[in-house]
């Protein structure tokens, strides 16, 4: 049943910016495989030519007037940041 | 009768006649919270001080003889997924444990403009992912009817505090059943309006094509009052619908003559708890007695809804939750040395197990090579599920089903098996995928005194029909009057 390999789990975790220890990886491998096995039941249906539904109400390109609105002050926005400097978000060094 | 046990419409009548004050209502509710919330764990944050200030301000306006809205002076509890200006909003997650929104969700602005009193933020499954409120990073919530059982989820806190009289009404959010299922399990009225009916601006996103805000109330009349306050187009939510909002209180008509109700055979299948099945069939007989005609219908794609939901919702979640990177808000791991490891450590330490499971599932189904097989396939099946509803509503006005296949289960019973937990939403997920409005109302108790919910579904933007049917049922039965003993 294990349609997902440990390497797959590792690859997805990297894409999702998550890390796991070995035990967690095995647990996810097992659980995700079981959930995907269940999801396989969708293949019982022939969906050839059926249009996909991404949104239940047919909305296309909603526009609003391009007007300046003062929603927030800079300090209101940075107040929740783990680390700031001179009004900017601070992160670990990006470039060596 | 203590004020905390009363409904919005009962309290409003007394406020209007100046027989009581909002301060007295707020005091009654906080007394009750102090008495019961240690047992149920419904609240994550209480805003007692600001609640009394707001109540005093409303009382002054009543004293001046102002004609105030129905929710003026009424204590409301808010699910902790809705942003409240200046009040910590955690989404049930460690990653947002210190997040204080710099703005109000549109629904909060609407409640404030009515004069409603925010009394606190309620517990929930982390990022609204779960059906039992056991996935909260902070605490489980217990069902007021039996403290050994779960209140449902993900809006378990909002459902439990209304049933325990620790709030007059509350707001929740429903993605695959997160209002209706806990309303059923806690024995109150829970409405998921049509997708787009209520602005999602300020609702922390889980699965954006499914998420909807809605109320928990003690009766159907209060539900109509809450919808009147909450609905309407919002320029801040591009998916909010530009449709007229009727006065929902005008739908509170005690009459079902000529109404056609469909019973889909796929919702009455093996696996339903026998007591749930009996109570729902009795409720259907009552609806027929009250003048509705009952029609057997078929919705053949019902059984594919959970599989479809667990592709679409985690896929959208994996994208929505990419914003939690430890940079602009939320938890940041101190261990990281570079940017990528900061992302990874912050997210891995900040998110709980179920959230990570869904991010992994969603990332997998959207990843290169799998998109067509999973995500596109699920979107196509979503179309088939929606067509089931469209076809059903060509012949019937409403659809009636059980809300949940079982009454409240014990804490810990389903945590070991994610798939088993997912199947709790088997009767609520299809209508979520189709964007249809739905309500859960109490329709009985099991022999162990656990509530059973009746789900009524309507075509898009026909919440009024739901309210009419629910109101008529309520006016002619007494299920909604039962209260837990705490």
Image (tube, helix red, strand yellow):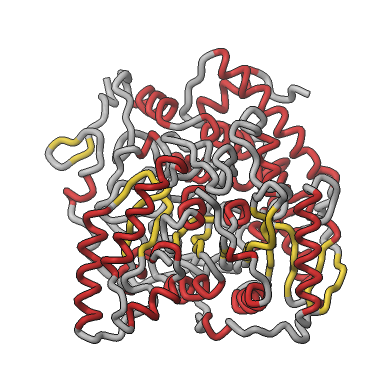
Residue name at image x 51 percent, y 15 percent? A21
Which of the 4 image quadrants contains residue B251?
Answer: bottom right
Q: Quadrant of the N terminus of chain B?
A: bottom left
Residue B414 visible, this angle: yes
Please tell me whether residue B285 is drawn above or below residue B27 in the rendered image. Answer: below
Nearest the camera: B295 or B377? B295
Residue B308 visible, this angle: no
Give the residue at the far left of this rendering.
Answer: A86
Residue name at image x 67 percent, y 30 percent? B417
How many callouts does the rendering have? 0
Position of residue B93 in the picture relative to residue B267 (left or right): left
Which of the 4 image quadrants contains residue B29?
Answer: bottom left
Whole-percent x, y for residue B79 in the image: 43, 52
Position of residue B237 in the picture relative to residue A12 (left or right): left
Which of the 4 image quadrants contains residue B430?
Answer: bottom right
Whole-percent x, y for residue B360 in the image: 57, 32
Give the residue at the far front of this rendering.
Answer: B1
Nearest the camera: A96 or B405? B405
Residue name at image x 55 percent, y 68 percent? A59
Whole-percent x, y for residue B327 in the image: 30, 36
Position of residue B103 in the picture relative to residue B443 (left or right): left
Whole-percent x, y for residue A36 in the image: 72, 34
Residue name at image x 41 percent, y 70 percent? B234
Give the residue at the far top of this rendering.
Answer: A22
Please tell me whether residue B97 is drawn above or below residue B13 in the rendered image. Answer: above
């Amino acid at each position: 049943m294990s349609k997902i390999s440990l390497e797959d789990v590792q690859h997805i975790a990297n894409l999702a910016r998550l890390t796991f220890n070995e035990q967690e990886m095995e647990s996810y491998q097992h659980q995700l495989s079981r959930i995907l096995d269940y999801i396989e039941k969708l293949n019982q249906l022939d969906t050839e030519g059926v249009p996909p539904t991404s949104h239940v109400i047919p909305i296309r390109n909603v526009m609003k007037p391009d007007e300046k609105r003062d929603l927030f002050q800079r300090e209101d926005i940075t107040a929740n940041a783990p680390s700031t400097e001179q009004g900017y978000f601070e992160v670990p060094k990006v470039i060596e | 009768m203590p004020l905390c046990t009363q409904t919005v419409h009962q309290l409003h009548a007394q406020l209007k006649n100046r027989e009581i004050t909002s301060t007295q209502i707020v005091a009654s509710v906080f007394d009750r919270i102090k008495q019961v919330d240690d047992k149920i764990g419904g609240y994550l944050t209480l805003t007692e001080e600001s609640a009394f200030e707001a109540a005093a301000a409303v009382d002054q306006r009543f004293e001046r003889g102002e004609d105030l809205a129905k929710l003026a002076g009424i204590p409301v509890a808010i699910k902790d997924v809705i942003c409240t200006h200046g009040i910590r909003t955690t989404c049930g997650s460690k990653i947002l444990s210190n997040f204080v929104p710099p703005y109000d969700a549109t629904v909060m602005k609407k409640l404030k403009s009515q004069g409603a009193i925010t009394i606190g933020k309620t517990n929930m499954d982390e990022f609204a992912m779960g059906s039992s409120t056991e996935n909260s990073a902070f605490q489980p919530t217990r069902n007021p009817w039996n403290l050994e059982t779960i209140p449902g989820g993900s809006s378990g806190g909002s459902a439990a505090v209304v049933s325990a009289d620790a709030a007059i009404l509350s707001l929740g959010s429903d993605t695959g059943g997160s209002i209706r299922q806990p309303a059923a399990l806690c024995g109150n009225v829970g409405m998921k309006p049509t997708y787009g009916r209520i602005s999602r601006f300020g609702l922390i996103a889980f699965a954006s094509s499914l998420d909807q805000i809605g109320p928990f109330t003690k009766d159907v009349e209060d539900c109509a009052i809450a919808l009147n306050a909450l609905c309407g187009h919002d320029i801040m939510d591009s998916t909010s619908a530009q449709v007229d909002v009727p006065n929902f209180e005008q739908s509170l008509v005690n009459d079902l003559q000529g109404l056609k109700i469909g019973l889909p055979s796929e919702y009455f299948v093996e696996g339903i708890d026998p007591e749930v099945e009996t109570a729902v069939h009795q409720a259907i007989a009552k609806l027929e007695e009250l003048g509705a005609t009952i029609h057997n219908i078929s919705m053949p794609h019902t059984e594919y809804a959970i599989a479809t939901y667990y592709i679409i919702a985690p896929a959208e979640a994996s994208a929505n939750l990419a914003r939690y990177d430890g940079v602009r808000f939320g938890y940041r791991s101190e261990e990281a040395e570079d940017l990528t490891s900061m992302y990874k450590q912050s997210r891995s330490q900040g998110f709980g197990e179920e959230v990570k499971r869904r991010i992994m599932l969603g990332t997998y189904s959207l990843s290169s090579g799998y998109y067509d097989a999973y995500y596109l396939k699920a979107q196509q099946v979503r179309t088939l599920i929606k067509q089931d509803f469209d076809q059903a509503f060509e012949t019937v006005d409403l659809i009636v089903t059980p809300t949940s296949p079982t009454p409240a289960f014990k804490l810990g019973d389903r945590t070991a098996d994610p798939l088993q937990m997912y199947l709790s939403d088997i009767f609520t997920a299809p209508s979520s995928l189709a964007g249809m409005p739905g309500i859960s109302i109490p329709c009985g108790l099991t022999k162990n005194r656990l509530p059973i919910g009746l789900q009524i579904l309507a075509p898009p933007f026909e919440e009024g029909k739901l309210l009419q049917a629910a109101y008529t049922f309520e006016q002619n039965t007494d299920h909604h009057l039962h209260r837990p003993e705490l």
